[in-house]
Image (cartoon, rainbow, N blue to C red):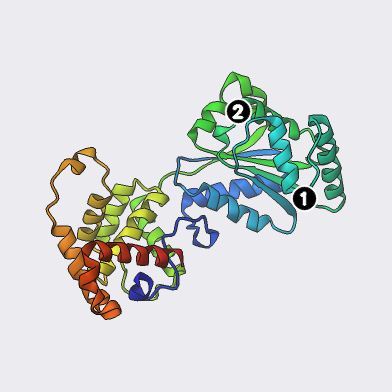
């Protein structure tokens, strides 16, 4: 319903790290260039650090897409609590079915794989996402992997990706040797107001928006930039809800008033839940969608009542977003 109303092929503000929607802001361009250069130059270790919601995973997917053909990539997302679990997960992703045995035996299997890949001119890139959650022993074991090398090149390239806590970990005396191995560190910083507007327009364009008129007014973009603090995930959440509300209100253009109402709906201040319900939103919501419900279900609308209408429309919006 929302996609049809705004003439979009797909949801422009989805929650998945789709590299097609990657917006090349200045900070994202610099970080991507650092990752590609660090891996391409065979530096062994590079790191990507940013606060939550800045698009680290999306950037990693794009960097691996650009390196495709010359590298084999392993992404490690799951919680890993020991060096043995780390090595088992790595070998499993490399297609090794038998991951039994101790650490030394598993390291020997990994060495055989790396040597064979080197013969074929292919390098292994291990991406460790949310690396700030790893125990120091696992990070130290990752450092040991950089010892797999020939006289000419490193056989394993490792990208550590994580939140600012990762930077604090790497600066600790316990991980001094690992910090010395990291030759490049890329950072992602929040978007400016101008970049926020370009980001929103970019995602709408990728999703199929073709109108010459901007969907969001300049006042709406300014408010989105302020409320999101320039964090892409926050921008997506605000814009997703703004499109939903805009569709319900039959707005072709999203203005600052819609954004203010969205921010009120997203406010988690405990005090608001103690206020008595005025019923205004419920009446407006039902009156907005009642015609569509009546066309679809005819005489069933009075039987369903308002609660049924809310459940139906909520489900409709979710299904539309998933598609």
- Farthest front residue in view: 303
Dividing the picture into quadrants, the one containing residue 173 is top right
Give the camera-side residue of 81 and 253. 81
Quarter assignment of residue 271: top left
Which of the two labelled residues, at mark 2 and mark 1, occupies the earlier sequence position? 1
- Mark 2–mark 1 CB contact (< 8 Å): no
Residue 166 location (% of width, % of height): 54, 32
Give whichever of 97, 183 is nearer the camera.
97
State the separation of the CA atoms marked 2 and 1. Answer: 25 Å
Q: Nearer the viewer, residue 266 or 68?
A: 266
Which residue is the site of mark 2? Answer: 135
Residue sitting nearer the eye, 17 or 210: 17
- Residue 95 visible (yes or no): yes
- For the point 80% across and 37% down, the residue is 100
Q: Is residue 163 above or below residue 240?
A: above
> Dot 1: within a 10 Å radius of its alpha carbon, few (fewer than 14), some, or many (20 or more) residues?
few
Q: Residue at x 50, y 37 (%)?
A: 163
Residue at position x 87%, y 50% in the image: 119
Q: Which mark is residue 95?
A: 1
Residue at point 28%, 77% (across, down): 297
- Label 2 SS: loop
Q: At which x and y percent is residue 94?
A: 75, 48
Q: Is residue 17 above or below residue 3?
A: above
* 88, above or below 61, in the image: above
* Element marked by disc 1: loop
Q: Horizontal placement of 159 versus 229: left or right?
A: right
Hey, which residue is sitting farthest top in the picture?
173
């Amino acid at each position: 319903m929302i996609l049809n109303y705004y003439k979009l092929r797909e949801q422009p503000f989805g929650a998945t790290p789709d590299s097609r929607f990657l917006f090349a802001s200045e900070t994202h361009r610099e970080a991507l260039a650092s990752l590609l250069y660090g891996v391409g130059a065979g530096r062994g270790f590079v790191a990507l650090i940013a606060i939550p919601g800045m698009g680290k995973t999306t950037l990693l997917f794009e960097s691996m897409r650009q390196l495709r053909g010359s590298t084999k990539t392993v992404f490690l997302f799951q919680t890993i609590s020991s060096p043995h679990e780390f090595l088992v997960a790595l070998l499993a992703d490399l297609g090794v079915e038998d991951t039994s045995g101790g650490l030394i035996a598993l390291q020997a299997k990994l060495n055989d794989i790396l040597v064979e890949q080197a013969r074929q001119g292919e390098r292994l890139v291990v991406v460790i996402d949310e690396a700030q959650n790893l125990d120091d022993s696992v990070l130290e074991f990752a450092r040991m992997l950089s010892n797999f090398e020939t006289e000419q090149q490193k056989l394993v390239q490792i990208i550590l990706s994580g939140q600012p806590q990762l930077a604090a970990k790497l600066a600790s005396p316990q991980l001094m040797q690992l910090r010395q191995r990291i030759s490049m560190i890329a950072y992602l910083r929040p978007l400016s107001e101008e970049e926020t507007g370009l980001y929103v327009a970019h995602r709408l364009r990728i999703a199929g928006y073709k109108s010459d008129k901007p969907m969001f007014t300049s006042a709406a973009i300014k408010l989105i930039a302020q409320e999101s603090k320039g964090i892409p995930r926050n921008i997506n959440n605000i814009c997703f809800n703004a499109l939903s509300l805009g569709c319900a209100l039959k707005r072709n253009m999203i203005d600052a008033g819609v954004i203010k109402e969205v921010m009120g709906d997203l406010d988690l201040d405990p005090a608001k839940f103690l206020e008595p319900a005025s019923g205004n939103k419920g009446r407006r919501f039902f009156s907005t969608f009642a015609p569509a419900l009546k066309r679809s279900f005819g005489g069933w609308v009075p039987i369903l009542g308002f609660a049924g209408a809310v459940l139906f429309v909520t489900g409709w919006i979710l299904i539309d977003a998933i598609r």
